[in-house]
Image (spheres, coloured by chain):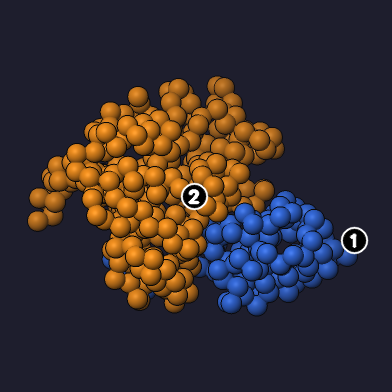
């Protein structure tokens, strides 16, 4: 099996998503609050997995713009769950050694007196292993 | 009625008033929140990877503690409610996760999702009843126009959280009516505040919250209520913001006439 196919299968396995269910209606991207910030849009994520181009996904800045708001998951008429694909790609990055998107030494300068603990634990869980 | 209570990390610290007002209101309404012993943080976000087990265990422990007491589990924070319900759904319906989580837990009897998870607002709607709540209001918030800010974590995914209609919710509006105020329905009430993006990308969260607060003000709200400390934090950083944002438990405590007494000791200490 080629490396590209293997990577695409890994993303499907981590996410539990079957990208072939997608009927390309674009509702996920239409509803995404981060759409303007994303280089690869949620509906395109699904196509990239089908085309076995995971390399582009793991290098996409979209991974760090997704808010896990589940608007795309809720509104997909085919129950594809594009947000879970984005998370799986994010996992493929942060699970590698020293690929965390957030490190503890960055924290002090990001803090302010009102910042809730919830924000730190959430960001740590999404951005690093 | 006694419930197992899971406050969560932020209700112990930055959102102490969310917790204090919830406890005082529960007392006034005649139900008890019994805090789960040695609870651990839920992690703030639900781990989406199907192979993630270890970071769901803090929830499984809390859920099992409630099961052992034969109680339903109540949360107040939107994020805790979200993570707890989704982990519980995994334990109920995903055999692989359930088996592997129980292998870690080594319980006398495996946990299989027996506990029911309720958000505090669901307790008000489904257990107390908004009509009953209305009868116990001593200080109705007459003339106040309040916008409910739902955000994401109370509502989506609707099938799993089963909290309310995720596209057209009404539980918070019904709550606002029950405490004697007037709900303001505005288009952005279930749009995302930016969530954890505000740690590293403050401007992104700010522009999202600007849209929310502008929408609410435009439709005539003089105040927003939320159940989430992170939504509160983000909304308070909106650059166009003039509208105050308060926790829903604060207006509840106010309407029930327990607001002044419940945080008195602490306020005196701070003063």
Q: Quadrant of the C terminus of chain B?
A: bottom left
Q: Is residue B119 above or below residue A104?
A: above
Q: Is residue B233 above or below residue B210?
A: above
Residue B161 as seen in the image, left or right of residue B100: left
> In the rendered image, which quarter is residue A47 located in?
bottom right
Residue A105 as seen in the image, left or right of residue B144: right
Spot the orange chain and give its letter.
B
Residue located beneath label 2 in the image? B169
Rendered residue at 60%/73% (across/down): A35
Rendered residue at 36%/53% (across/down): B183
Residue located beneath label 1 in the image? A1
Q: Dot 2: within a 10 Å radius of its alpha carbon, few (fewer than 14), some, or many (20 or more) residues?
A: some
Spot the blue chain and give its letter.
A
Foreground label between 2 and 1: 2
**Protein chain holding label 1:** A
Element assignment for label 1:
loop
Residue B211 percent across, percent down from the top left: 44, 71
> In the rendered image, which quarter is residue A76 located in?
bottom right
Labels 2 & 1 near each other (Cβ < 8 A): no
Residue in the foreground of this view, choosing between A13 and B242: B242
Q: Is residue B255 above or below residue A90?
A: above
> In the rendered image, which quarter is residue B32 located in?
top left
Residue A69 percent across, percent down from the top left: 55, 59
Element assignment for label 2:
loop
Rendered residue at 10%/50% (across/down): B268
Q: Is residue A76 above or below residue B128?
A: below
Rendered residue at 69%/35% (across/down): B95
Q: Is residue B154 visible?
A: yes
* Cα gap from disc 2 to disc 1, whole angstroms: 48 Å
Residue A73 as seen in the image, left or right of residue B253: right
Residue A58 percent across, percent down from the top left: 69, 70
């Amino acid at each position: 099996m080629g490396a590209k196919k293997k990577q695409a299968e890994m993303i499907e396995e981590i996410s539990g998503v079957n990208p072939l269910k997608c009927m390309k209606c674009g509702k996920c991207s239409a509803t995404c609050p981060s759409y303007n910030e994303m280089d690869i849009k949620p509906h395109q994520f699904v196509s990239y997995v089908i085309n076995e181009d995971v390399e582009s996904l793991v290098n996409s800045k979209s991974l760090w713009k997704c808010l896990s708001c589940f608007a795309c998951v809720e509104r997909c008429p085919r129950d594809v769950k594009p947000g879970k694909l984005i998370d799986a790609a994010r996992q493929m990055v942060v699970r590698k050694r020293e690929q965390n998107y957030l490190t503890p030494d960055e924290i002090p300068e990001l803090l302010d007196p009102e910042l809730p603990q919830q924000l730190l634990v959430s960001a740590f869980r999404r951005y690093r292993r | 009625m006694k419930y197992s209570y899971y406050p969560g990390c932020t209700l112990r610290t930055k959102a102490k008033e969310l917790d204090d007002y919830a406890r005082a209101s529960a007392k006034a309404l005649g139900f008890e929140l019994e805090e789960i012993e040695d609870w651990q943080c839920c992690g703030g976000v639900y781990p989406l990877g199907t192979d993630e087990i270890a970071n769901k265990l803090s929830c499984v422990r809390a859920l099992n503690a409630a099961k052992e007491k034969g109680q339903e589990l109540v949360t107040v924070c939107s994020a805790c409610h979200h993570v707890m319900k989704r982990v519980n759904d995994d334990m109920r319906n995903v055999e692989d996760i359930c088996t592997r989580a129980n292998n870690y837990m080594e319980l006398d009897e495996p946990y299989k999702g027996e506990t029911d998870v309720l958000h505090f607002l669901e307790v008000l709607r489904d257990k107390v009843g908004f009509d009953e709540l209305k009868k116990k209001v001593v200080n109705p918030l007459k003339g106040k126009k309040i916008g409910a800010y739902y955000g994401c974590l109370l509502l989506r995914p609707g099938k799993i959280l089963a909290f309310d209609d995720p596209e057209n919710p009404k539980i918070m509006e019904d709550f606002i009516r029950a405490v004697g105020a007037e709900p303001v329905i505005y288009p952005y009430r279930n749009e995302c505040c930016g969530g954890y993006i505000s740690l590293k990308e403050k401007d992104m969260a700010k522009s999202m919250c600007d849209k929310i607060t502008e929408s609410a003000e435009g439709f005539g709200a003089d105040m927003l209520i939320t159940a989430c400390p992170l939504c509160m934090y983000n909304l308070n950083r909106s650059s166009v913001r003039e509208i105050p944002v308060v926790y829903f438990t604060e207006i509840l405590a106010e309407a029930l006439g327990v607001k002044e007494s419940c945080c008195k000791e602490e306020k005196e200490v701070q003063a």
